[in-house]
């Protein structure tokens, strides 16, 4: 008891009544739980620094799966694998049978066998060389798709295995050596990172198409290593596309910069001034910016010079005028390029994602109640009761998404207040649900925009491939390698969502003989149609 410095103790504990002793004991339990949490985090950090295995993560509560409508039972129906339809041309080969004389031929019984042939080939192109009468040298061009000393099929295989197959460079090199390809690790690395500007540009166009046309985007981030330093990878996507960007910061300014999709300009417009007012920038400062005739700046240097001229950089007030004004100008750039125009940004309540029309994930919100520490039967009963109410309410929201109705929306808003304004007697739980009620507009965005999902499971599923890549290959060293990794993961995940085989996509881009024509992916995203 003497270590709980913030708990005032009476002269004699025997003078306290039983309710007072119980209240004191509950407060001590809460503080001990907080200390145990801090000690646990410190132990995990020590284990991470020592390279030891950390404690397992807590399993999700299962609210989303539990609130799915029951599926009709299919009794008496036996499932079959279905007809096998290979994507390649089937070769018919007749197998003779040894039969005695007098037998009658009754046709054929098909037996389909699929196989894979992996072999290395080497072709030496003898290119004709001519000298014209005027002294010019003419050299016969290489066949389409041949760009360098490694052919398009080999390049497609390397890109496919590394980025979608999540293989490592040493294992790829070992495999290629075993089938007869003479290639070094350095040459293999060049196949992965050199001359890939077209893929990086296409991934950028996919992001622009998604931001221009999508009614909502779901976002998330995770840790990343680059150039020996800790960074962060941000995911932006929805049902039609996915894009990844790795940067050294996870600030709101970084997120806004990613939303510019490669543009570098800073714009002062109505959206920028609204952002400034929302984030409490002083009115005289906003007026000084609005009074200037110049509203567009090509790059960061020009923008910072403008702020310095107006005296923003010399101010030492809170909030930082340079930061708020810069975020606002970047947001103005996002809107000027018609990105996220009236679109919803769905996140897990990380502060950097709170821009524009913002919605929150219900699964993350319920998880706060699910993980709450309880110490008495009364507290556990209160927690269970609130969780049950949230689950029932979540099921009603899912039903509303399928059949939106204005009257039902009004009823759901009133029910939200009844759940999250109620007092349970469990102080910590009451503070938590009051905090959730403060986010009412963001949690109930679905009532105004039914197309918005109720959770960020899509983002977490998308970013899982990046986490796997991080576990397999740790981090990147060069900026080019970082951009290639992000671009190919973005393109591979977008292909999966559009129903395009990554193998066919790479074959189309690398001009493999007999390839299937795949249009630029941003066309499918803009049209929101899957290729035939």
Image (spheres, rainbow, N blue to C red):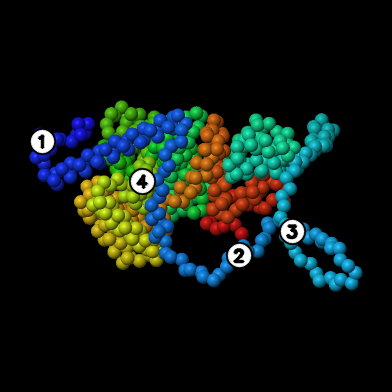
Decide: few, some or many residues near mark 3? Use Cα within 10 Å; few <14, some 14-19, many ≥20. few
> 374 or 440, which lies in front?
374
Q: Give the left or right position of residue 497, taking residue 155 as reference.
A: left
On-image quarter of the N terminus: top left
Decide: few, some or many residues near mark 1? Use Cα within 10 Å; few <14, some 14-19, many ≥20. few
The mark that comes first in sequence, 2 or 3, is: 2
The mark that comes first in sequence, 4 or 3, is: 3
Kindly identify the residue that appears in the image at 68 percent across and 58 percent down: 86
Query: What residue does disc 2 label?
Result: 80
> 90 or 65, which lies in front?
65
Query: What residue does disc 3 label?
Result: 90
Is disc 2 placed on a helix, strand or loop? Answer: loop
Residue 12 numbered tag? 1
Residue 349 numbered tag? 4
Residue 293 percent coordinates (x, y): 36, 38
Where is residue 415, by image quadrant? bottom left
User: What's the CA distance linking mark 3 and mark 1?
Assistant: 91 Å
User: What's the CA distance linking mark 2 and mark 3?
Assistant: 23 Å
Where is residue 287, by image quadrant? top left
Judged by depth in the image, the label closer to the viewer, 3 or 1, is 1
Decide: few, some or many residues near mark 4? Use Cα within 10 Å; few <14, some 14-19, many ≥20. some
Judged by depth in the image, the label closer to the viewer, 2 or 4, is 2
Residue 417 percent coordinates (x, y): 25, 57
Judged by depth in the image, the label closer to the viewer, 4 or 3, is 3
Residue 286 percent coordinates (x, y): 30, 39
Q: Is residue 486 above or below residue 369?
A: above
Number of marks drawn = 4
């Amino acid at each position: 008891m003497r270590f709980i410095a913030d708990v005032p103790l009476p002269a004699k504990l025997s003078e306290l009544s039983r309710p007072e002793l119980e209240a004191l004991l509950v407060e001590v339990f809460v503080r001990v739980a907080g200390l145990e949490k801090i000690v646990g985090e410190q132990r995990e950090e020590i284990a991470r620094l020592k390279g030891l295995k950390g404690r397992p993560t807590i399993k999700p509560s299962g609210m989303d799966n539990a609130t799915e409508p029951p599926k009709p039972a299919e009794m008496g129906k036996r499932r079959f694998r279905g007809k096998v339809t290979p994507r390649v041309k089937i070769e018919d080969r007749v197998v003779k049978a040894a039969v005695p004389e007098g037998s009658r031929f009754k046709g054929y019984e098909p037996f389909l066998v699929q196989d894979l042939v992996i072999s290395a080939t080497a072709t030496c192109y003898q290119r004709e060389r001519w000298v014209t009468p005027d002294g010019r040298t003419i050299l016969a061009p290489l066949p389409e798709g041949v760009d360098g000393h490694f052919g398009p099929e080999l390049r497609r295989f390397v890109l496919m295995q590394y980025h979608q197959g999540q293989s490592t460079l040493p294992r790829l090199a070992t495999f290629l050596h075993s089938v007869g390809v003479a290639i070094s690790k350095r040459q293999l690395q060049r196949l992965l990172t050199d001359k890939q500007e077209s893929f990086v540009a296409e991934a950028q166009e996919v992001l622009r198409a998604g931001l221009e046309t999508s009614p909502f985007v779901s976002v998330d981030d995770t840790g990343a290593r680059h150039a020996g330093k800790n960074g962060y990878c941000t995911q932006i996507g929805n049902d039609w596309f996915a894009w990844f960007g790795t940067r050294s910061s996870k600030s709101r300014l970084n997120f806004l910069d990613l939303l510019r999709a490669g543009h570098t300009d800073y714009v002062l417009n109505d959206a920028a001034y609204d952002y400034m007012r929302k984030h409490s920038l002083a009115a005289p400062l906003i007026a000084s910016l609005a009074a200037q005739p110049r509203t567009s700046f090509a790059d960061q240097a020009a923008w910072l010079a403008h702020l310095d001229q107006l005296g923003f950089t010399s101010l030492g007030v809170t909030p930082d005028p340079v930061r708020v004004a810069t975020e606002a100008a970047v947001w103005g750039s996002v809107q000027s390029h018609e990105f996220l125009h009236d679109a919803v940004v769905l996140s897990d309540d990380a502060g950097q994602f709170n821009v524009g029309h913002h919605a929150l994930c219900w699964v993350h919100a319920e998880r706060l109640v699910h993980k709450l520490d309880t110490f008495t039967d009364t507290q556990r009963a209160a927690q269970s009761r609130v969780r049950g109410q949230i689950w029932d309410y979540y099921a009603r929201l899912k039903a509303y998404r399928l059949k939106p109705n204005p009257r039902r929306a009004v009823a759901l808003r009133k029910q939200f207040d009844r759940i999250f304004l109620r007092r349970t007697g469990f102080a910590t739980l009451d503070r938590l649900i009051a905090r959730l009620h403060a986010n009412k507009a963001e949690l109930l965005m679905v009532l105004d925009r039914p197309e918005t999902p109720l959770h960020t499971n899509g983002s977490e599923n998308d970013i899982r491939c990046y986490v796997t890549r991080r576990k397999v290959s740790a981090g990147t060293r060069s900026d080019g390698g970082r951009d290639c990794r992000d671009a190919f993961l973005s393109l591979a995940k977008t292909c999966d969502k559009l129903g395009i085989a990554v193998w066919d996509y790479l074959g189309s881009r690398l001009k493999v003989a007999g390839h299937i024509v795949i249009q630029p992916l941003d066309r499918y995203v803009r049209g929101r149609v899957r290729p035939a």
